[in-house]
Amino acid sequence: MDLLLGQTVRFSSDPFKGPVSDCVSHETRGAIAVENGLIRDIGTADQLKSDYPQAKITDYGDALLSPGFVDTHVHYPQTAIIASWGKRLIDWLNSYTFPEESRFGDAGHATAVAETYFNLVTASGTTTTVSYCTIHPESVDAYFTAAQKRGLRVLGGKTCMDRNAPDNLVDTAQSAYDDSKALLGRWHGQDRLSYVITPRFAPTSTPEQLEALGTLWSENPDLLMQTHISEQHEEIAWVADLFPDAKDYLDVYERFGLFGPGALLGHAIHLTDRERDRIRETDASLIHCPTSNMFIGSGLFDMHGLMEQGHRIGLATDTGGGSSFSMLRTMAAAYEVGQLNGHPLHPAQLWWLATEGSARAIRMEDKIGTLAPGSEADIAVIDLSSTPGIAQRSARAEDIWQAVFPTIMMGDDRAIQAVWANGVCLKS
Ligand code: GUN
Ligand code: ZN
């Protein structure tokens, strides 16, 4: 058994639903007992040291022991084109994204990028990612192989698209169905890996392909399904053009069987009232990608209004439309979007979104995203004084959230002192 010592915060309830002080308990000298890949116990350092006298102790001082971050929407194949300048969504896809994604039929390239990607995200404290791969099965194999090697709990799927993309980057309705089915048979449920059915978005799939993927989902109803919705106005107008019979963007997915409680809807910035109501009553998940929304110039996600309405919301980098691999930077961007909307998020809400809230969005809060006994031992150890600028500010803090907020706003991979995945230390 391992005993990790440091500060701990635990959420007893959703900090969007009540005063933060009622939802969180903080331990200055806390401890987590880890055994066989799981969190066995959590409490004070004194108590757990006396309860488990044989445990191997790693003392992280006053660093914060947090659940590893859960990044609910990424495109790992866009790792090498992150921070590509000057385009909005459709031009950005055509100029930067599609040329890079077309290289992933080469298994060597896919493996090299997947390795780089997981090195970057684990160094940033992220222990779960939900990725779009490319149309190529090789890209899915590379992603899951690299994650499996590191013992990570990750999710992902083959991106399906059979129109409005370059000739060397399209599949067909039939091959999308066949390849997705073969890949989910190969990977879903292996170790900590989960397959996600992945139509890229309505403009790049024919009705036949959407229908085939809706059929695949109905045959595998326990899987999650991920796609994009209502990111930019030009995109929404394009969808209306391509699907003139649909009531709205959401209805395109719904009429082909691609909408239900297990849907992860990326961006969701410009939803109509009908779409918001329908998503709420279905309890599907919305995925907020704030660095991406500002980088590609998409707009401001209505976190406050959607949370008030009771939506299930995850947080995500959207690498490489998003401009960071780090969930710290992503929390900072969510804070800034909240400010621009007139509703600043509390640091506890931001931290919850990056951990338990995101785990809830992908319906895995019984496994990851919390420090509850029985949860899988994916833990990020956060240095709350990782740079001189952060240290001089956190030294003034009067409570734990004042101590955490400078790291949210100014922290990066230097703040990640150690990372544990599945009970094993990956970075120290
Ligand atoms: N919409 C469809 N594909 C993509 C993508 O790769 N990134 C973003 N940000 N939006 C998309
Ligand atoms: Zn995306």
Image (spheres, helix red, strand yellow):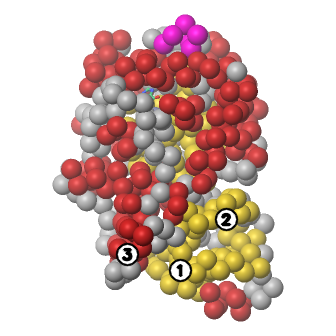
Q: Secondary structure at mark 2?
A: loop
Which amino acid type corresponds to the residue marked 1 in the rendered image? Asp
Q: Which residue is mark 3?
A: 392
Task: Tell me, yes or no, whether the highlighted magenta stretch contains residue 302.
Answer: no
Q: Which residue is mark 1?
A: 62
Q: Which mark is residue 428?
A: 2
Q: Give the position of the N terminus as an image quadrant.
A: bottom right
**Mark with earlier residue (1, 3):** 1
Q: Give the position of the C terminus as an image quadrant.
A: bottom right
Instruction: List x then y, in percent, for residue 113.
Output: 64, 34
> Which range is magenta?
165-170
Foreground: disc 1 or disc 3:
3
- The answer to whether any part of residue 255 appears in the image is no
* Distance (Cα) linking label 2 and label 3: 24 Å
Q: Is residue 98 left or right of residue 230?
A: right
Q: Is residue 36 left or right of residue 235?
A: right
Query: Crowdedness of circle 1 by 10 Å Cα count: few (<14), some, many (20+)?
Result: some
**Mark with earlier residue (2, 3):** 3
Q: Residue furthest left?
A: 342
Q: Secondary structure at mark 3?
A: helix
Q: Which mark is residue 312?
A: none
Q: Residue furthest front?
A: 388
Picture quadrant where residue 13 is located: bottom left
* Distance (Cα) linking label 1 and label 3: 15 Å
Q: Nearer the viewer, residue 184 or 53?
A: 53
Picture quadrant where residue 401 is located: bottom left
